[in-house]
């Protein structure tokens, strides 16, 4: 029996690619990255475009693992508890959407402030760009 998992996608304002193919590719990469944890995400926040820096010990610096995209995702429990999992989906380059590895941090509250601007890591929906939900079929 197959199951359809409906996923709502969000982009940070200013982070939506101009090309529709890039938008779709990035959404696919985000879903693949979340699925590395064997969960069925209900919401995915795409926090930015490809880059090779990260925050380590409170400082921005080159990511030793290289280029990645930053995502946050929620399964049904996270939606209810207003928490999320942040992750990096590593790729061969900033415009290459082939997942090579994924890393995750433990769940944290949506209201957790970013170190650089004190804004919440997962902003209110009104402050995000919402993309129509997509259904993923699982057997």
Image: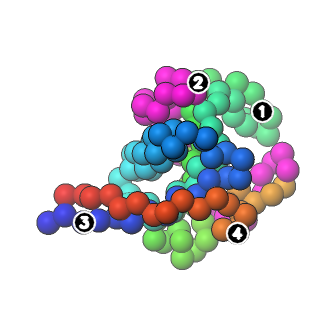
The mark that comes first in sequence, 4 or 3, is 3
The mark that comes first in sequence, 4 or 2, is 2
Q: Identify which residue is drawn at 43% across, 33% down.
A: 99
Residue 32 lies left or right of residue 80; in this view the side is left
For the residue pair 107 and 36, the one nearer the viewer reads as 36
- Categorize mark 1 by other alpha carbons within 10 Å: few (<14), some (14-19), many (20+): few
Q: Is residue 110 shown above or below 14?
A: below
Alpha carbon separation for disc pair 1 and 3: 41 Å
For the residue pair 50 and 74, the one nearer the viewer reads as 50
Q: Are marks 1 and 2 in contact (CB under 8 Å)?
A: no
**Residue range of the region highlighted in magenta in the rendering:** 88-117
What residue does disc 1 label? 60
What residue does disc 4 label? 126
Q: Identify which residue is drawn at 57% across, 33% down.
A: 68
Alpha carbon separation for disc pair 4 and 1: 28 Å
For the residue pair 13 and 111, the one nearer the viewer reads as 13
The mark that comes first in sequence, 2 or 3, is 3
């Amino acid at each position: 029996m197959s199951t359809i998992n409906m996923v709502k996608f969000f982009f940070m304002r200013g982070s939506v690619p101009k090309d529709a193919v890039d938008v779709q590719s990035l959404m696919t990469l985000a879903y693949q990255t979340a699925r590395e944890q064997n969960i069925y995400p209900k919401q995915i926040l795409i926090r930015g475009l490809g880059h090779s820096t990260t925050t380590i010990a409170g400082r921005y610096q080159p990511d030793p693992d290289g280029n990645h995209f930053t995502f946050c995702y929620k399964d049904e429990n996270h939606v209810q508890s207003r928490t999320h999992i942040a992750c990096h989906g590593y790729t061969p380059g900033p415009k290459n959407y082939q997942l090579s590895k994924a890393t995750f941090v433990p769940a944290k509250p949506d209201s957790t402030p970013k170190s650089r601007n004190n804004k919440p890591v997962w902003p209110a929906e009104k402050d995000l760009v919402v993309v129509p939900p997509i259904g993923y079929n699982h057997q």
